[in-house]
Amino acid sequence: MPKANIILDSEQIKNKIRRIAFQIYESNVDETRLILAGITKSGYHFARELKKVLEEISDLEILLCEVTVDKKNPLNPVITSLDPSEYTNRSVVLTDDVLNSGATLIYGVKHFLDVPLKRFNTAVLVDRSHKKYPVKADFKGISLSTSLHERVEVHFAEGNDRVELL
């Protein structure tokens, strides 16, 4: 098993999330409500952490939305925990932990394009720059140049958050 290199530790992740939250707030300062739509598991956890900081630094009403994309069959319908009427004509930020090929993010984006939105952005903790799809992260914690054989894993564990390169 390859040795993991820690790219970001818990404190660094916390700082990245705080910076991204400020960037999101700056882009949505004229809004009253913001939807943070996190891709299931780590992307949703990332959205929850962003929500905590945004609630500290702003008076925005933040709604969390869990977004489920079938990674094995991405043409299957995307499922959201909020009804589309709750994000219609609202500002939405779609979040994921790692932007790798862009497949998960692009299918998530496609889902939200079926609804009229006021503003739409994407946020990732790690951007790997190995995109197969024309999707970009508007807000990112770190850009990481890696080989295709390397893997990036984000672990959210209370007091032991970390990003590892394997």
Image (spheres, grey):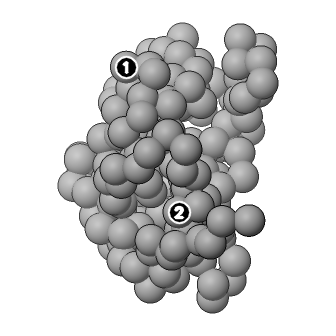
> Foreground: 110 or 125?
125
Q: Which residue type carries mark 1?
A: Pro
Q: Residue at x 63, y 24 (%)?
A: 84
What is the quadrant of residue 55 in the picture?
bottom left
- Dot 2 crowding, Cα within 10 Å, few <14, some 14–19, many 20+: some
What is the quadrant of residue 82 in the picture?
top right
Residue 35 point in image, percent of width and height: 50, 44
Q: Up-down: is 24 above or below 117?
A: below
- Dot 1 crowding, Cα within 10 Å, few <14, some 14–19, many 20+: few
Residue 112 visible, this orientation = no
Left-right relation of 69 to 52: right
Looking at marks 1 and 2 on the same chain, the residue that comes earlier in the sequence is marked by 1
| Quarter placement of the N terminus | bottom right
The residues tagged by marks 1 and 2 sit, at their Cα atoms, a distance apart of: 24 Å
> Would you name the residue on which mark 1 appears?
134
> Foreground: 2 or 46?
2
Label 2 near label 1: C-beta < 8 Å? no
